[in-house]
Amino acid sequence: MIKKIRESIFLLWHLRILACTYMPGDLGYELRYNFWKTRLKFLGKHVKIETGVYFQNPQFIHIDDNCWIDRNVIILAGL
């Protein structure tokens, strides 16, 4: 029973990430902004994150105001 609950939680988490990453339109922009706002070191105002964008080590990434991250961009960061 606990294994099925864990699998369900795991599946829901990945579905949330997929929906956030690939949702088109204004809803997608809002979902991605809110998702990454809590994970990046800093995410400024009026940042547009297109579909398919991936951040590795987001805790080290700082994106200032009025930036646009184009489709399928991968941003890598580290110490």
Image (spheres, helix red, strand yellow):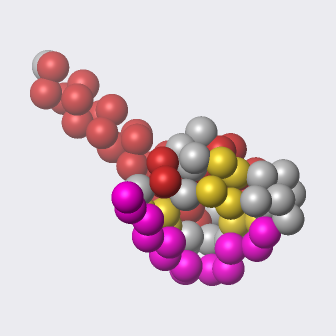
Q: Is residue 17 above or below residue 6?
A: below
Q: Residue at x 44, y 65 (%)?
A: 77
SS assignment for the magenta stretch, majority: loop
Q: Tally the marks.
A: 0
Q: Quadrant of the N terminus?
A: top left
Q: In the displayed image of the protein, which residue is found farthest to the front?
A: 79
Q: Residue at x 54, y 44 (%)?
A: 39
Q: Which residues are magenta?
A: 67-79
- Residue 56 % position (x, y): 41, 62
Horizontal placement of 8 versus 21: left or right?
left
Q: Is residue 12 above or below residue 61?
A: above
- Residue 32 % position (x, y): 65, 54
Is 74 contained in the magenta span? Answer: yes
9 or 57, which lies in front?
Answer: 57
3 or 62, which lies in front?
Answer: 62
Q: Quadrant of the C terminus?
A: bottom left
57 or 7, which lies in front?
Answer: 57
Q: Quadrant of residue 62?
A: bottom right
Q: Residue at x 70, y 51 (%)?
A: 43
Q: Residue at x 49, y 75 (%)?
A: 74
Residue 32 is at least partly visible in this image: no
Residue 41 is at least partly visible in this image: yes
Q: Quadrant of residue 19?
A: bottom right
Horizontal placement of 41 versus 24: left or right?
left
- Residue 47 % position (x, y): 79, 61
Is 45 contained in the magenta span? Answer: no
Horizontal placement of 21 versus 42: left or right?
left
